[in-house]
Amino acid sequence: MKPSSQNANALPIYVQVSELLIRDIAAGRLIAGERLPPERDMANDLGISVGTLRKALAELTGKGLLERVQGSGNYIRQAGPAESVYGMFRLELPSGGGLPKADILNVCVMDKPADLKPFGTSDEGTRVRRLRYLNDVIIAVEEIWLDGSQGKLSADQISDSLYHTYQKQLGFWITRAEDRVGIGAVPDWAPSAFPKESGTITGYIERLSWSDRPEPVEFSKTWFDPDRALYVQRLK
């Protein structure tokens, strides 16, 4: 996995690296007591500077996930769930983990169509269509609707993490979500880069998300390739 900066609103490289490691710990790919490779080797593998890596490791140390032993190295600590930008992102590589990334396909503010699942209080919303990755593997296409009552977004405001974008650009937080998983046809707007052709039956996730309001403020639907990604919900 090579961290990248998509635009001015992309997550900082050190945050991308810390999020990748958090997801690997949650997936069991990194276990308590395991010693990480030497920092210079890790930085070279990730294509980043040692200084950037150390900033990412400091994030993990602050969250209680890493112990840095002077003269010995960096060790994974056993810990409970950690605060994460992608804490609600449930798709993982079959081997576990993977850093979520996204390419924006289209962003527009428009009236909600009649067949859209009811949510929010406004008749219009911001619709975002994206191609999703884990590391560099294309795994899903998604359509997200943000209720107009929460504000409007343009493509140049959106980072890989929409929930981070909501906090940074619109000043609200997603506090909870409800997922429903099923199977259905890949939409006709899916780009050719997505490995499942339009009309192919595949897995999907529908999500309603809430901020501090009684009504959900976001609805999304994500069609994923089950050959490349799995839906994972860990119970603590």
Image (cartoon, helix red, strand yellow):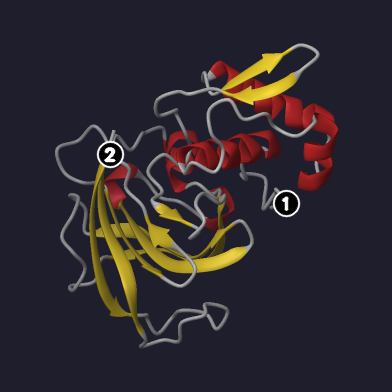
Q: Which residue is mark 1?
A: 2
Going from N to C along the chain, the mark reached first, 1 or 2, is: 1
Q: Amino acid at mark 2?
A: Leu
3 sits to left or right of 170: right
The secondary structure type at the circle numbered 1 is loop
Q: Where is residue 48? Give x, y as percent.
A: 80, 41
In depth, the one of 163 and 119 nearer the eye is 163
Alpha carbons under labels 1 and 2: distance apart: 30 Å
Relative to 112, does residue 173 appear above or below in the rendering?
Answer: above
Q: Which residue is mark 2?
A: 235
In depth, the one of 108 and 182 nearer the eye is 182
208 sits to left or right of 84: left
Q: Where is residue 94? Give x, y as percent.
A: 48, 60
Q: From this viewpoint, is residue 183 visible?
A: yes
Relative to 174, does residue 33 appear above or below in the rendering?
Answer: above
Is the residue marked by circle 2 packed among few (<14), some (14-19), or many (20+) residues within 10 Å?
A: few
In depth, the one of 108 and 49 nearer the eye is 49
